[in-house]
Image (cartoon, grey):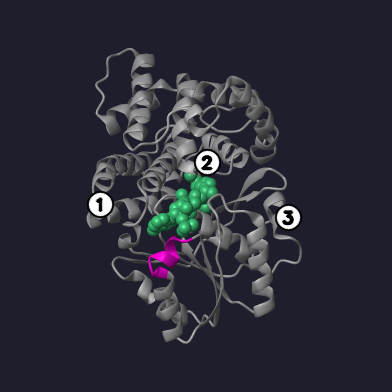
Amino acid sequence: MENFEFVSPTHFVFGRDAELQVGEKLAERGAKKVLLHFGGQSAQKSGLLDRVKGSLDAAGIEWIELGGVRPNPEINLSREGVKLCKENDVDWVLAVGGGSVIDSAKAIAVGAHYDGDVWEIFESKEQVTDVLPIAVVLTIPAAGSEASKNTVVSNDELGMKTGYANNAQRPKLAFMNPELTFTLPPYQTAAGITDMYCHLLERFFCDVGPVPVTDNLCLSLMRTIRAEAPRVMVDPEDYEARANIMWAGMLCHQGLAGVGRHEDWATHGMEHELSAYDTTITHGAGLAVMFPAWMEYVCEENYDRFIQYGREVFGLVITGDKEADALSAVDETRAFFSSLGMPATLQELGIESEEQLEEAIAEMLPTLKINKGEPFGNFKKLTVEDAAEIYRLAF
Ligand code: NZQ
Ligand code: ZN
């Protein structure tokens, strides 16, 4: 087991009506003025925003609001948020939404007491320590940003989507009410499930030997997600299944499922380039296409790891033909994502011809190199030329 540090400061309030405790819990922590940050429409339409505002009012906490976060959030809105925080002496940032809203909130919290432009931090990766505390009301289980140390934000002007990791931006409070996810469109539910599952794949496929305590946590979460996913797809108001998926999404990405190993993250890197190339691509859908392609490309590095995964998650019987057994595990993964209604090819994501594919690759590789460096990934060290081959496999 590799040495590690693990920080997890998040206080979770989980279950029905969790969001009604927002005001009380923030007041206990001394919050005086909150920036309430949210997305397009869903939180408004469902009445969630009004309930959160009511809870803040009842606790005597002042708030100002900034909505309009789009999926694949853009830095300009975070810049606006930073300005609002500076002008209004905001002391907490409260995100009501999914990964995009939370990530935008993290950028705001990190930039609020920073002297320069917040994008500089995404470039320099400086570990700023003076970060506003963040609270989250989660509305979609997917990115795991409600407890993770990461944020991922797009800069349309530069054509980039860039991640930034810092334990200081882990949310201090996360309110998780599974009922809030009943209104999710099936595509978003499916993309979220795919994303959380891929957060486990990124950790399970690594370049160090077995770490049973961590490996088994991953495998158990994979089995749980596989079992609960069809239940929420069939009945979006199945509270128990929604609750299991919601908690799983957090466990997949807060960090425990990766400790003691070198995580991979090559596929997330390649997907982030895709959703920077076309900002309408949903992160989970991009992963559903890219992950099986990556698996096919790298599995010969360690067939046994793939065979273990296939046996323990899909119940595959070992035939003794290592390559065939490993590829069966890849096929099962692709079939799982397809069963949720996720795409399987880049063509389904709107890259229509080989010519467009090559154009996209030419656009994505330079920013991939800036974001990930070279080589990147750990299970197999990849060059950007390898990435080009993987995009072609995914086409
Ligand atoms: O904007 P609204 O109207 O709220 O609609 C959203 C959005 O269109 C909708 N939605 C959310 N909750 C809903 C709902 N619709 C109905 N009912 C609800 N309860 O869902 C759409 C997608 O929302 P978004 O926040 O974009 O989804 P997700 O949580 O999947 O976040 C994706 C973003 O997170 C990043 C991704 O790259 C992507 O930008 N990631 C962040 C990570 C992190 N911070 O640790 C790790 C991940 O690997 C990922 O990269
Ligand atoms: Zn992800």
- Hey, what amino acid is under mark 3? Glu
- Hey, what amino acid is under mark 1? Ala
- Marks 3/2: CA distance? 25 Å
Mark with earlier residue (3, 1): 3
Q: Which residue is mark 1?
A: 241
Q: Are the two marked residues, 3 and 1, in contact with CB atoms closer than 8 angstroms?
A: no
For mark 3, does the 10 Å Cα neighbourhood hold few (<14), some (14 to 19), or many (20 or more) residues? Answer: few
Q: Which residue is mark 3?
A: 120
Residue 298, relative to residue 249: is it above or below?
above
Q: Residue furthest right?
A: 116
Q: Which residue is mark 2?
A: 281
Give me the residue at 61% from left, 77% from top: 90
Look at the numbered disc 3 and say if its residue's Cβ is closer than 8 Å to ligand 1: no
Q: Nearer the viewer, mark 3 or mark 2?
A: 2
Closer to the camera in the image, 45 or 326? 45
- Hey, what amino acid is under mark 2? Ile
Examine the rendering and report whether any part of residue 6 can be seen: no
- Marks 3/1: CA distance? 41 Å
Residue 383, relative to residue 118: is it above or below?
above
